[in-house]
Amino acid sequence: MIKRIGIGLGAFAAALVAGWVMIGPDWRALISDPPSNTDVLFWSQSQRDTGFQMLDRVPFLVDTRPIKSSSSVYDLPQGPTLAIDDALQTYFDEGRAAAVVVLHKGKIRTERYGLEFDATERWTSFSVAKSLTSTLVGAAIQDGSIASIDDPVTDYIEGLRGSAYEGVSIRQVLTMTSGVGWDEDYEDPTSDVARFLAHEPSDGLPIIVSYMRGLDKAHAPGEVWNYSTGETNLIGILVSEATGTPLADYLSQKIWGPFGMEAKATWLVGPDGVEMSGCCIQATTRDFARFGQFILGGGRIDGAAILPDGWLDQATTKQADIGFDPWGYGYQWWTYDGNAFGARGIFGQSIFIDPDRELVIAMNSSWSSALGVRGGEREAREVFQRAVQSAIDAETAVN
């Protein structure tokens, strides 16, 4: 996720006072404490608590593209409540949680909401969207729109030809090992992640392509992992170019609608109208959990494979060393110890998937800092996830 949220809020400050009344009565808490700038990292805690629920709701704030829901909803039946009351309360207290949905064997075992958020509302994903974007690469391969992830990325994004991306494969972009220099420092206003949306594109190229083609090579391709929201945005361009379909529409057509997502979702777009595929899908927490269930089920819908054979095995296992063993990085998925993996976004957004336990945990939060280190929220989340796993194991042992 980027320092400026990745949402192109240039008009925000000028329209703030005049347009705030358009929000309506649901946002009374924010009216008294509106964001004073466009950088989410510098919003107050109360601004984030409410703002993460409304990034796609204010016409003067941001443009979006809809992700259509399904007429046939994937059922999430209620199962017996999981014995994690103390751990759940602790995470809501220490992790500033807005929502937790725990699915075990496809049933809701725990569901709780906070921060005046509920099951019918949308919360922003931040970089959880990266894992959805990479899944669409698999769908495009299954459809025949992309031949192989070992193809050069420049075969699909012509605007990158002649740049540091020459000789870089789609696989290396997926694993963030392209070797192209990129600075993801959220605290530095001169970093790439802070500056790219303000870039003036040339030659009619999308903003992100125009910006990324100007970067220098820092390493040989495949040698060094470097986290880059810019490269996930390139992946979105690649999928759209290959399929001839806007990214939000492709997600609607391939997964969101067919699998049975219950609520309309949205994808934020940049100033050029292109989805910011490294960030910012707004959806209900239940639908984020349903996406986790889709992945847990092998990426199949009504028995039909949406993804190529072996795709998820590769995508969700360690492909790159991130310097924090035993964790690693797959195709835009974080890989953990055991057989677990997940999607993560700043301020506590996540989808945790544990295939061995048939477990999905979807969480939305409003941490006190982007990475949740200073306030201890990240550690609180890890403790909560382990508590859920232990509760499942205890049930299994009894049965």
Image: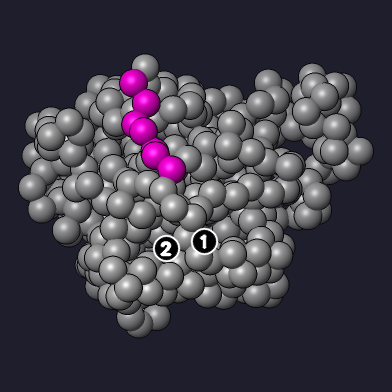
The amino acid type, in three-letter code, at marker 2 is Tyr
In which quadrant of the rendered view does residue 147 lie?
top left
Q: CA distance from mark 1 to mark 2?
A: 7 Å
Residue 217 as seen in the image, left or right of residue 272: left
As drawn, 117 above or below 328: above
Instruction: Please name the residue shown 28% across and 68% down the image.
Output: 399
Query: What's the magenta region?
Result: 72-78
In the rendering, at what x and y percent does residue 18 appear? 87, 22
**Which is more N-terminal, label 2 or label 1?**
1
Residues 73 and 39: in front is 73
As drawn, 3 above or below 143: below
Q: Which residue is mark 1?
A: 184
| Label ID, residue 227 | 2
| Local SS, label 1 | loop
In the rendering, at what x and y percent does residue 277 appear? 42, 40
Q: Is residue 320 magenta?
A: no
In the rendering, at what x and y percent does residue 395 appear? 36, 69
Residues 52 and 38: in front is 52
Instruction: Please name the residue shown 50% across and 65% down the image.
Output: 83
| Label ID, residue 378 | none
Q: Mark 1, residues whose alpha carbon is within 10 Å: few (<14), some, or many (≥20)?
A: some
* Labels 1 and 2 touching (C-beta < 8 A): yes
In the rendering, at what x and y percent does residue 289 appear? 42, 45
The amino acid type, in three-letter code, at marker 1 is Glu
